[in-house]
């Protein structure tokens, strides 16, 4: 599990490294989109604007300058990604990483160019396509080449920026060593890419062909995966290859071969001869529009309508803000995170509908592209302004209306049916909805807030790298167990996600400012003293928190819930907790309390502890299919039991012989009522050992 967390942490860093170069695409796309639209003579004639905005007018000149400035960004995306990813992956001394990224990019392509001039003819160009990269004739690596440089430079930078050399070479030590090392390494990488890239490129063409050949089903799966990876911050890693490499298709536009869905769209946007945008490219983008402009606002309206009457005014303000953000900019996290952590099942349904949105846009041949957001701004410039014939954008409206209605009624029904505690539906009116939290979404972050965040993360010494994406503060920590969930919750956090020694804290759109303020604060002299004081005070306050322990109910090996091979449990849909791989067929009560329910098929039961914890124990996976065979319950609903009391026996070996996985999840189904749930033990355990500690 430790290795899994490590891999996840690396992927998180890769995902957030992509955010810096991706962040420039919206403004570049708008400049290009507005410019190409308003300088298109066919459109100007259609709207009788030639005299005002036609060639030769001042307005035409201004708009064309903007268009060309947007175009230059897309033309040089590989270099932008090389530098941006280098900066994003670097833990410190990011300016050095940026310089090293640029140098390595030039060196790699020049090495490839030299190899092409020396051996290109005899090697029959290895069937690899060539391109002009900033005046260098090189293989057509596209954005992948920039990412390759960024990731490699990031690794080399983090490893060598503190290197100490012998005194005679000390001038080249530390950060000065990084550009030197990267230059040498990427000469070798360029030579290597000359040999290995052409077959890789051909393989990517083949995979792209499979994706395209998969038709509507492939588009559906793409949409589901893109949305499902949002909570983990890995969606950029997933969709970028489709947008920027041949995985997303290859097409000749204006006499030039273009790779990548987004590149194809913008090449067609710039081509006056294009009469209809390519649906095989826009299938990887267009699905966002019905989802973000119509579907999620429908969910927001349902959450508002399901709130308690006395809470609707405050919840309405929250939902309107989140819905408008989704509709205008396509940034959905503020809205999605209002139900993701409370009801992961709802988010799972949302992912399925995301896949359907992509598929339906493909079916209806709606060819509206985007920069990265999928909101009204992109729809206007890349759909409406391009015209119905090019994009079929009008079909977004009826499809969107259907999405709004479905999302509203489905969310409304499920929230009420399963009593989901969305904003405004808490058992007791929560103060945070009566009055806006002191720290939430503030631009003037106080030192008190910053100190509390640092203390909640375990103190200044426990914090490694700090970064953020659109709404989440992301930190690499030395010891994740030092995190105080309750203290972080007091700072206005909407949710916390932990993997390995990485943590994501959801704050909202102002998190970029918060990240910079936190970094500046941690560099001050007073920070250490203030954080220590908070940690000292919190030690006393945490001791006073109401605690309850959950014991191991079966002798065996305790594992994290994420390792259970059932999405309902591993995805946290049924609550937080742990699982046990049993060594014997005896189940004991993990708490003092009563048996709340015994399932008819005897494969599961629910308990309520004397302190209010609702504990669900599920003996094995898919064991409901046995219809009760091999389970011997010793208790019945309503019966009081003591911790450690035998409550069930089951035929472990017989079930294993029949092919059943007997991993037993133990989950706290009312986990939302607790400030923090701490997993104390992983590995071999005996009955009665404390596994979970619940804090109220």
Image (cartoon, rainbow, N blue to C red):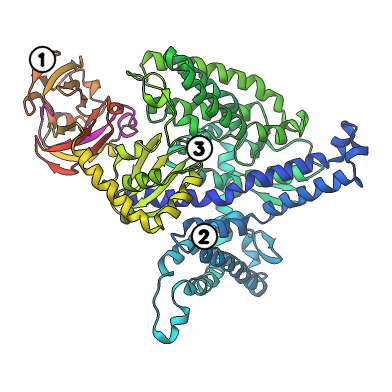
Mark 2 surroundings within 10 Å by alpha-carbon count, few (fewer than 14), some (14 through 19), many (20 or more): many
Q: Which label belongs to residue 86?
A: 2
| Horizontal and vertical percent position of residue 237 | 50, 47
Query: Sequence-wise, which precedes: disc 2 or disc 3?
Result: 2
Which span of residues is magenta-colored? 565-590
| Mark 3 to mark 1 CA distance (whole Å) | 47 Å
Q: Does the segment drawn in magenta span residue 576?
A: yes
Mark 3 lies on residue: 226
Q: Does the segment drawn in magenta span residue 575?
A: yes
Query: Sequence-wise, which precedes: disc 1 or disc 2?
Result: 2
Rendered-image quadrant of the C terminus: top left
- Asked if labels 3 and 2 touch by Cβ distance under 8 angstroms, the answer is no
Circle 3 SS class: helix
Mark 1 lies on residue: 639
Query: Sequence-wise, which precedes: disc 3 or disc 1?
Result: 3
Q: Residue at x 71, y 32 (%)?
A: 380
| Mark 1 to mark 2 CA distance (whole Å) | 61 Å
Q: Quadrant of residue 633?
A: top left
| Horizontal and vertical percent position of residue 522 | 40, 55
* In this rendering, position of residue 544 left or right of residue 213: left
| Mark 2 to mark 3 CA distance (whole Å) | 24 Å
* In this rendering, position of residue 197 left or right of residue 610: right
């Amino acid at each position: 599990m430790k290795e899994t967390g490590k891999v996840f942490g690396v992927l998180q860093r890769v995902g957030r490294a992509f955010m810096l170069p991706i962040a420039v695409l919206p403004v570049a796309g708008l400049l290009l989109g507005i410019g190409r639209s308003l300088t298109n003579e066919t459109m100007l004639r259609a709207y009788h604007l030639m005299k005002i905005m036609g060639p030769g007018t001042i307005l035409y000149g201004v708009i064309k300058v903007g268009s060309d400035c947007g175009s230059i960004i897309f033309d040089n995306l590989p270099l932008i990604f090389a530098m941006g990813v280098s900066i994003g992956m670097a833990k410190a001394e990011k300016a050095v990483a940026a310089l090293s990224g640029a140098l390595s990019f030039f060196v790699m392509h020049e090495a490839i160019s030299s190899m092409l001039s020396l051996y290109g003819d005899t090697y029959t160009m290895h069937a690899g396509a060539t391109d002009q990269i900033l005046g260098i004739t090189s293989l057509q690596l596209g954005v992948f080449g920039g990412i390759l440089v960024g990731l490699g430079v990031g690794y080399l930078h983090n490893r060598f920026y503190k290197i100490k050399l012998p005194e005679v070479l000390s001038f080249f030590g530390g950060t000065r060593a990084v550009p030197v090392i990267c230059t040498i390494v990427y000469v070798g990488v360029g030579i290597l890419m000359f040999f290995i890239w052409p077959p890789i490129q051909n393989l990517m063409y083949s995979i792209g062909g499979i994706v395209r050949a998969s038709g509507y089903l492939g588009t559906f799966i793409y949409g589901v995966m893109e949305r499902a990876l949002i909570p983990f911050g890995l969606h950029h890693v997933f969709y970028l290859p489709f947008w920027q490499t041949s995985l997303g298709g290859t097409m000749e536009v204006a006499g030039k071969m273009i790779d990548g869905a987004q590149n194809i769209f913008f090449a067609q946007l710039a081509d006056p001869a294009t009469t209809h945008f390519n649906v095989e490219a826009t299938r990887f983008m267009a699905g966002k529009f019905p989802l973000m402009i119509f579907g999620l606002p429908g969910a927001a309206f349902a959450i508002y309508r399901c709130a308690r009457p006395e809470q609707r005014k405050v919840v309405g303000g929250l939902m309107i803000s989140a819905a408008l953000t989704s509709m205008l900019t396509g940034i959905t996290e503020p809205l999605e995170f209002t139900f993701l952590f409370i009801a992961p099942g709802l988010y799972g349904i949302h992912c399925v509908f995301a896949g359907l949105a992509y598929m339906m846009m493909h079916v209806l041949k709606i060819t509206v592209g985007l920069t990265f957001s999928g909101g009204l701004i992109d729809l206007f410039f890349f759909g409406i302004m391009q015209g119905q014939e090019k994009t079929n954008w009008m079909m977004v409206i009826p499809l969107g209306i259907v999405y709004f209605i479905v999302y509203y009624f489905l969310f409304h029904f499920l929230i009420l049916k399963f009593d989901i505690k969305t904003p405004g539906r808490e058992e007791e009116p929560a103060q945070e909805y009566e009055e806006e939290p002191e720290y939430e979404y503030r631009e003037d972050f106080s030192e008190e807030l910053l100190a509390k965040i640092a203390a909640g993360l375990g103190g200044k010494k426990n914090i490694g790298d700090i970064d953020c994406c659109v709404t989440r503060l992301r930190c690499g920590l030395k010891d994740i167990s030092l995190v105080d969930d309750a203290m972080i919750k007091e700072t206005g956090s909407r949710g916390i996600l932990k993997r390995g020694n990485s943590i994501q804290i959801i704050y909202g759109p102002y998190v970029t400012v918060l990240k910079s303020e936190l970094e500046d604060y941690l560099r001050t002299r007073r920070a250490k003293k203030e954080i220590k004081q908070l940690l000292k005070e919190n030690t006393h306050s945490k001791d006073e928190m109401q605690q309850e322990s959950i014991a191991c109910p079966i002798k065996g090996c305790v594992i994290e819930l994420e390792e259970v091979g059932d999405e309902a449990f591993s995805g946290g849909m049924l609550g937080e907790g742990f699982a046990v791989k049993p060594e014997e067929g005896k189940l004991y009560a993990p708490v003092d309390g009563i048996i709340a329910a015994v399932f008819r098929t005897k494969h599961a039961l629910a308990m309520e502890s004397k302190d209010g914890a609702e504990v669900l124990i599920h003996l094995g996976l898919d064991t409901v299919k046995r219809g009760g065979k091999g389970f011997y319950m010793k208790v019945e609903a309503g019966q009081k039991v003591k911790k450690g009391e035998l409550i069930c026996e089951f035929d472990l070996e017989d079930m294993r012989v029949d092919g059943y996985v007997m991993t037993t999840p133990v989950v706290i189904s009312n986990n939302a009522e607790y400030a923090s749930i701490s997993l104390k033990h992983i590995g071999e355990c005996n009955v009665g050992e404390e596994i979970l500690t619940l804090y109220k």
